[in-house]
Image: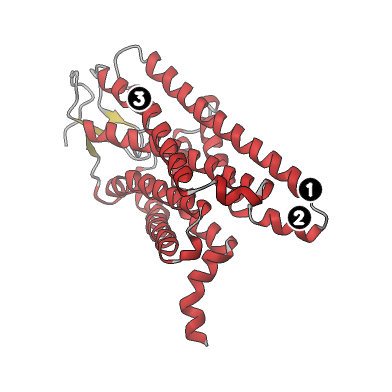
């Protein structure tokens, strides 16, 4: 592997991912939790997809959206972890220029889709609680399909200009990325050009996605809480809010680490670089791993289906 620090080039054939600068000696130890996360996330999300497919009682809007969430989690994990582990285990740091931009696009677009799916689930919970008699007629299969298509298109199209902008910049000083994956700002900072357009567009896209999605989720839960408070008994209130518990946990596990990473990246100038990198990985990799645990524990239908083989053996 050649060092490209002093090489002049306009379009590099490869980038070199450093992993976690300053913690190279600890890469083997750091790889252990990440190595554990990937099989758990993969097995867990495939299990959710399998259970929903095989159980007719789960063929409903919330579970269709849950399938979409599982697919986005699988794509996010697979976009990052295999290359990350090859860096940790085999010191395989090179990544093709086009592959780097493809990874960048998949990470950003499926993160946006993941956020959109959380909005869709919030809308489903709003209709189910605030207007239950019209739930089946409002969220029909064609409506669910259109919502799913809108979620996919809004993530795919909004993020599409980002890799194209990154491709147009000249890279003429170095191709070394101080990161574990092709994070957008880490890539475009290597360009020897004014990258303001890339920076402003990515920031605007992130603000547009997060602010709108959080706004719609907040509006849905504002109406849900008002409907729950109006219920006559405490048991009814707890039981009704319990149907939203899994979704609330997923929202918190998705947005809080992402918000913390964003704030430390933008304003935490005294935060060590390795902490920035670790946080950027945690907010992408931890939610896919947690989804099976959250939905498996809190959703009775999925929990019962998961435990069914064991309960049959015990009877």
Q: Residue 78, how many percent across, how many down?
A: 33, 48
Where is residue 81? Give x, y as percent: 34, 48
> Is disc 2 surrounded by few (<14), some (14 to 19) or many (20+) residues within 10 Å?
some
Distance (Cα) linking label 2 and label 3: 45 Å
Quadrant in which residue 138 is drawn: top right
Q: Is residue 278 at all visible to an observer of this figure?
A: no
Determine the secondary structure under disc 3. helix
Tell me the crowding category of disc 3: few under 14, some 14 to 19, or many 20 or more residues within 10 angstroms, Cα based. many
Indicate the position of residue 25 as horizontal and vertical percent values.
Answer: 35, 46
Question: Tag 3 or tag 2, which sits nearer the N-term?
Answer: 3
How far apart are the alpha carbons under marks 1 and 3?
44 Å
Which residue, given by chain and number where applicable, does mark 1 sit on?
Answer: 229
- Using the image as rendered, state which of residue 239 and residue 24 is in the foreground: 239
| Quadrant housing residue 277 | top left
Please name the residue shown 38% across and 59% down the image: 46
Which residue is the extreme one toward the right?
A: 232
Nearer the observer: mark 2 or 3; the answer is 2
Could you tell me residue 271's position as x and y percent? 52, 32
**Residue lying farthest top?**
194
Q: Residues within 10 Å of mark 1 (few under 14, many from 20)?
A: some
Which element is circle 1 on?
Answer: helix
Label 3 sits on residue: 162
Mark 1 and mark 2 in contact? Answer it, CB < 8 Å: yes
Q: Which residue is mark 2?
A: 237
* Separation of residues labelled 1 and 2 (CA atoms): 7 Å
Name the residue: 28% across, 31% down: 101
Task: Name the N-terminal-most of marks 1 and 3.
Answer: 3
Say above or below: 176 vs 123: above
Q: Is residue 304 left or right of residue 4?
A: right
């Amino acid at each position: 592997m050649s060092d490209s620090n002093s090489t002049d080039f306009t379009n590099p054939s490869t980038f070199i991912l450093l992993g976690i600068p300053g913690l190279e000696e600890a890469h083997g130890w750091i790889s252990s939790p990440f190595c554990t996360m990937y099989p758990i996330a993969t097995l867990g999300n495939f299990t959710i997809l399998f259970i929903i497919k095989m159980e007719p009682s789960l063929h409903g809007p919330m579970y269709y959206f849950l399938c979409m969430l599982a697919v986005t989690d699988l794509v996010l994990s697979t976009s990052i972890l295999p290359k990350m582990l090859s860096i940790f285990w085999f010191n395989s740091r090179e990544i093709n220029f086009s592959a780097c931009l493809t990874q960048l696009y998949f990470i950003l677009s499926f993160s946006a889709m993941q956020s959109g799916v959380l909005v869709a689930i919030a809308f489903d919970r709003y209709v189910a609680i605030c207007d239950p008699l019209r739930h089946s007629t409002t969220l029909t299969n064609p409506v669910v399909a259109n919502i799913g298509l809108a979620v996919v298109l809004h993530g795919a199209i909004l993020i599409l200009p980002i890799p194209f902008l990154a491709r147009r910049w000249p890279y003429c000083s170095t191709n070394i990325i101080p990161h574990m994956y092709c994070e957008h700002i880490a890539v475009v900072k290597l360009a020897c050009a004014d990258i303001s357009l890339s920076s402003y567009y990515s920031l605007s896209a992130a603000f547009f996605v997060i602010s709108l999605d959080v706004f719609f989720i907040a509006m849905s839960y504002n109406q849900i809480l008002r409907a729950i408070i109006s219920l006559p008994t405490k048991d009814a209130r707890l039981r009704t809010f319990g149907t939203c518990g899994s979704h609330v946990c997923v929202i918190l596990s998705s947005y809080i680490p992402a918000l913390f990473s964003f704030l430390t990246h933008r304003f935490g100038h005294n935060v060590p670089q390795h902490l920035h990198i670790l946080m950027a990985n945690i907010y992408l990799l931890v939610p896919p791993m947690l989804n099976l645990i959250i939905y498996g524990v809190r959703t009775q239908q999925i929990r019962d289906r998961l435990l069914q083989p064991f309960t049959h053996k015990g009877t």
